[in-house]
Image (tube, coloured by chain):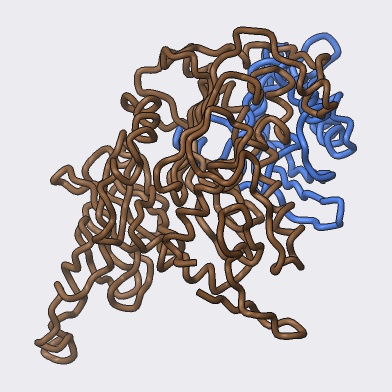
Amino acid sequence: MNINVTPGGNAPPPMEWPQGELTRIPFWVYQTPDIYALEQKRIYEGPIWNYLCLEAEVAKPGDYRTTFVGSMPVVVVRDYDEEIYAFENRCAHRGALIALDSGGTARDFTCVYHAWNYDLKGNLKAVAFEDGVAGRGGMPKTFCRSDHGPRKLRIAIFAGLVFGSLSDDVPPIEEYLGEEIAAKIKRVLHKPVAVTGRFTQSLPNNWKLYFENVKDTYHASLLHTFFTTFRINRLSQKGGMIVSPDGGNHASFSYTETKPADHDYAARGLRSDNEDFALQDQSLLTTIDEFGDGCNMQILTVFPGLVVQQIQNALAIRQVLPKGQFRTALNWTTIGFADDTPQMKTLRLKQNNLAGPAGYVSMEDGAVGGFVQRGVAAAGDERAVVEMGGTGTMTEGTRATEASVRGFWKCYRGHMGL
Amino acid sequence: MAGITLDRILAVQAAYIRCIDTGALEGWPGFFTDDCLYKVTTAENHKQGFEAGIIYADSKGMLTDRILALRQANIYEKQTYRHILGLPTVLSNGGGEAKTETPFLVVRIMHDGQSDVFATGVYLDTLRASDDELKFASRLVVCDSSRIDTLMAIPL
């Protein structure tokens, strides 16, 4: 399809995706308001699964969280039948938010504006003054409450992650994730989790720049020099990358190094090599092989906005939400397991320093999307080059590739019809 | 043992923010005891008893390491902070330790001149007096907002 940008001096030509392959990304895709509006319809409200919250965050009947599906506000709640439900956080009357807090416990929901009342499934149960006052006013006799209500989401729960979809055509969650990605999620989220903190990082860029960044295994050891300096993660380490068949989901992983590192970095004079750098407090670098497979890092994404993070013993769920074309909310939920020992709890608290807004490793990711957004400000007609590792989107035994980034665009363009 | 005098408490608070705001970050760990706890968290997490921090350090060594990482490894745009402190409330004072609560406001100034309120909140401190020195045995930085813009490079 063609997309028109906001006219400048000379009216620009209609924008079309570069033909043929996945190695060129036109920069207008990060800038155009039309694209942002279309993403809401075709992606977030389309046949995909949106990550909503952790099952542990709505553990008891009445527990609820408010979140978003793209720009759509959503309530996720566990009803007294023990099932989890989700519905648009929008009163059927005038459209006001039904739930105002980020979460809590409720027996029902009442819109503050005119006191229309909903049950925990999102059904409209009561309309204030429905029969009028003293026989006057009130709703017409033809008004049927069950014809009115916020949009309801389908729910899927996988490994304690709660997903929602507005589409009847979305595939089952296991199929949507892909067999290999599903196994990698279960590898980490294999027993009941406990939330240890929540933070929001407000990113100065389009959401896709952050999601691509997480999938981009090429940049990891080049931009993030903390890890390379300590030889925790190098492209020369044993590891690999899996991309789901549709391209939308990925997992990259590395294993503890057992042989001396090669000298690729030093020989090329890359900034990432600094032999003199030593930590005073080494306790941060102690890793417990809690999953019993020697894998010290696994970063996993699920289209369009979920990241499951294992960096050593620092575990976190990240939710990527668009806030206009130029702003992204990155919601961090740091987790441990319900049966963590005090020692393990402390280790996770220490290693949480590796990620998050002040993370030794991920700090740069908060800013680098903004560097791109600012860099391409006048380059809507130009294109990014994503050709590392060729043109494919398949699983590879190396992380010196952009296959998972191309996979993202394959999936994105499929949904968007671009 | 007499309590720690208010002028000593004020002096260490003033020196701390001056250290950060002038960019003399190598001096920052020196404000803490060796077995200190330094944590940046949010009012919401603090209220709910969530233990994770945006920054979490349980030794002075970890603070030194953070500055080393900022200087040697991390990439971020040139920026400075301006801390403005409110008046401290002394919650307890005796036995060589004082617990205080001090409100703060931090403006972040980017290299291009962009200046924004980056964080507001309170410092929940345990100050410990030893010999001639007064140091932070514990500094809990409780930010009012749960939202951090872009990144938090320099400590609060």
Quadrant in the picture for residue A22: bottom right
- Counting from the top left corner in percent of width and height, residue A118 is at 22, 64
- Counting from the top left corner in percent of width and height, residue A111 is at 31, 67
Q: Residue at x 28, y 55 (%)?
A: A170
Residue A312 located left or right of residue A236: left
Can residue A274 be seen? yes
Residue at the front extreme? Answer: A20
- Counting from the top left corner in percent of width and height, residue B33 is at 74, 15
Query: Which is more toward the observer, B47 or A261?
Result: A261
Residue B73 located left or right of residue A15: right
The chain that appears brown in the image is A
Quadrant in the picture for residue B112: bottom right
Residue A344 located left or right of residue A270: left
Residue A345, compared with residue A210, is above or below; it is above
Query: Which is more toward the observer, A115 or A39?
Result: A39
Can residue B47 be seen? no
